[in-house]
Image: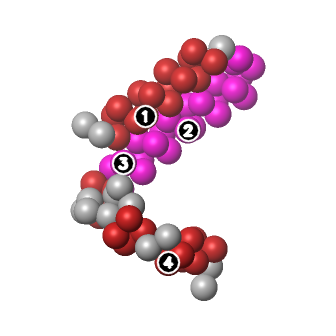
Amino acid sequence: MGIFEEHYDNYDLDKNSDYASLSKKHLVIEAEHMSNALHSVLKYLDEGGTDLDIIRGNVMDGIYESRI
């Protein structure tokens, strides 16, 4: 069993996760938005960005977009 499966089982995420009731399609959309937000933050940091307000804005945009 891998580390992710062990975590999933230990915390009974099938029942206890905020995402347990979502469809696979919705979960994929959610993951794509969050992945895009993370890549945006990493790109900004790689380009020398240091403004925490911009980083926070990218993260919040990812969270907001994933919940639409």
Q: Is residue 62 located in the magenta-colored stretch of the structure? A: no
Nearer the observer, disc 2 or disc 4?
4
Q: Quadrant of the N terminus?
A: bottom right
* Colour setting: secondary structure
Answer above or below: position of 26 versus 14. above
Inter-mark Cα distance, 4 to 1? 27 Å
Residue ID for mark 2: 38
Q: Do tag 2 and tag 4 residues touch (Cβ < 8 Å)?
A: no
Q: Residue at x 46, y 42 (%)?
A: 34
Of residues 30 and 36, the one drawn nearer to the viewer in this rendering: 30
Q: Is residue 40 located in the magenta-colored stretch of the structure? A: yes
Q: Do tag 1 and tag 2 residues touch (Cβ < 8 Å)?
A: yes
Q: Residue at x 36, y 48 (%)?
A: 30
Badge 3: few (under 14), some or many (20 or more) residues near its Cα, within 10 Å? Answer: many
Residue ID for mark 4: 9
Q: Main secondary structure of the magenta part?
A: helix
Inter-mark Cα distance, 1 to 2? 8 Å
What is the secondary structure assignment of the residue under circle 3? helix
Residue ID for mark 3: 30
Q: Is residue 49 left or right of residue 62?
A: right
- The kind of residue on which mark 4 rests is Asp
Image position, residue 53 (x, y; %): 57, 15
Q: Earlier in the sequence, mark 2 or mark 4?
A: 4
What is the secondary structure assignment of the residue under circle 2? helix
